[in-house]
Amino acid sequence: MHCQILADNPNATSTIASWYYHQWGHLSADRTLETVQSSLSDYLNRDTLPLILMLCRDDEPVAVAQLRFQENPDYPKDSHWLGGVFVKQSERGKRLGNKIIQLAIEKARTMNITTLYLQTESHNIKLYRQQGWQQIDTQDNHGITISIMVNQL
């Protein structure tokens, strides 16, 4: 298993778009698989935000995470966020979520990012707390309670 940047394996875009659409697509009535896939073209960067990191087996992604600017409009536009953390269903329970989060943090550090935010549903709070994230806010997002967390790198 190895880490790749989406820009180095753009063929993985359709797989990631499908994961994102089926996991979160229902939260926005105007979101389609095509709009999700199209939006991922913005993430084809290597050393600037936004970008996507992938854990891959051969060239097939099994876990992904995004580094990007402002995910939540209640925070400054230049704030840095970890988002889109997803592990392929058949690969869950193997600590790949932990690994992709750590790889994203390492990449953020190389980009001189000192503070990362994220928003997550309650069932994932423990995962992030174990890695040093602190909960700072709770909000409603399309009827789902989300927690805003921060990590000082």
Image (spheres, rainbow, N blue to C red):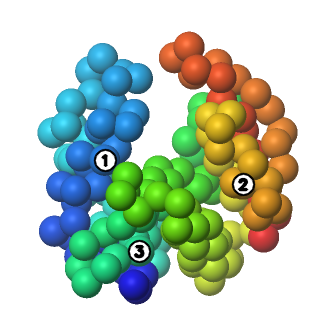
Q: Tell me the residue at 56%/14% (across/down).
A: 143
Disc 1: which residue:
19
Q: Percent x, y for residue 104?
A: 57, 70
Q: Percent x, y for residue 132?
A: 82, 62
Secondary element type, mark 1: helix
Q: Percent x, y for residue 100?
A: 53, 69
- The image quadrant that residue 16 belongs to is bottom left
Q: Nearer the viewer, residue 92 or 8?
A: 92
* Quadrant of the drawing holding the N terminus: bottom left
- The image quadrant that residue 25 belongs to is top left
Disc 2: which residue:
128
Q: Nearer the viewer, residue 32 or 97?
A: 97
Q: Is residue 79 visible?
A: no
- The image quadrant that residue 23 belongs to is top left
Disc 3: which residue:
55
The answer to whether residue 86 is left or right of residue 147 is: left
